[in-house]
Amino acid sequence: MARGFCFGALMLLAGIAGTGDAWAQDALTLPGKNYTVAFENSEVAVIRAHYGPHEKIPVHDHTSFSTVFVYLSDSGPVRINHEEAGSTEAPVIRPPTVKGAYRVAPGIAERHSIENLGNLSSDFLRVELKQVSLKMKEPFRGRAPLSLSEDADVVEFNDPQVQIERIVCVGAQVCAVKASAAPSLVVAFTSFSMTSEKTRMKEKVEAGAVRWVSAGEGMSVVAEGDGVAHLLRILLPKSER
C-alpha cells in the first residue's frame, strides 16, 4: 500500500544549463575547482561547493540573493575571511556541519576567501533564490534528523515566499507523492528511485542530486533496497508558473 506525502511534481533535469558555467565563472568570479553549477533557471541558481581538507580557496564574490545552504556531508569548521572594500570584519568561523542540515540566509553580497580548517571535505549546495528577498534578522538553521528510522513529512521553515519541507520515506514500500500548487527544488540526501505520474518514467536519483519540480503533478518515490529516501524540497509559492 502506498504511503501518501504532499510533494510537488518532478521535472527531470536534462543536464547542466548551457549558460550556467558563464554565469558562475564570469559574473561571480567563482573558482571553477570549488564551485560548479548544478542547475539554473529564472527562479534559482544551484551552486555545488566543495572544499577539500585544509584547502584554501582564493578571493571570490557571491550574489546578494537570499540563499539556502544545504549540507551534503559532515565537515569540520571553515574560516571565512571577508575581503569587501573597507571591511574591518574579523574572520568568521563556520561551525562544523552535519549531512542533512541546512541554513536559510537573507541576501547580502559577499567577497571573501575560504579556508577549510578540518580534516574532512565540506560539500554543500548554495541555492540562490533569484525572485525572493527574505527579511530576516538572523539566519534560520534547519537541523539534520537525529534518526531516519521513521517516515516524516514536516515543513521546517515557513515564509510567505519560501517553505522548506523535509520528507523521509523508510523501507521498500512506494511512497505516493501528491502534487503541490507551488513549484520547488528537490535535494536528495540519499539515493532513491522515482516515478512521474505524468510520464510513468522511472529514474534513479543519486544522493546530492537536485531536481526542479513543476506545479500540478504527482510522483512516487521508493528507497534503494531496505534503505531510506531522504529529501528536502524548497517550495516557492509566489513564483510565476
Image: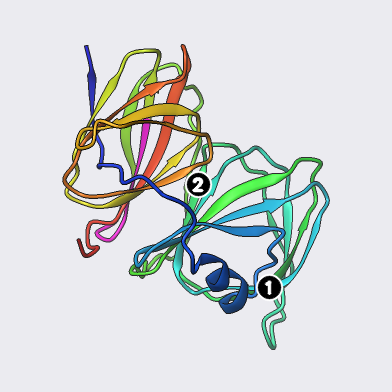
Which span is picked out in magenta?
159-167
The disc, 1 or 2, on the residue closer to the chain's N-terminal end is: 1
At 54% across and 52% down in the image, what residue appears? Answer: 125
The structure's colour scheme is rainbow
Q: Secondary structure at mark 1?
A: strand
Vertical placement of residue 28 versus 117, above or below:
below
Residue at left offset 60%, top offset 77%: 26
Residue 85 image position (x, y, % from top left): 68, 87
Q: Is residue 41 above or below residue 173?
A: below
**Residue of label 2:** 102
Q: Residues within 10 Å of mark 2 (few under 14, many from 20)?
A: many
Task: Identify which amino acid the numbered label 2 is placed on.
Answer: Tyr
Badge 1 amino acid: His
Outermost residue, bottom direction?
A: 86
Label 1 crowd bin: few (<14), some (14–19), many (20+), radius 10 Å = some
The quarter of the picture where the C terminus appears is bottom left
**Residue 143 colored magenta?**
no
The part of the image, by quadrant, that contains residue 7 is: top left
The residue identified by callout 1 is 60
List x then y, in percent, for residue 239. 25, 63
Residue 168: image x %, image y %?
A: 38, 27
Q: Of residues 216 and 134, which is closer to you in this image?
A: 216
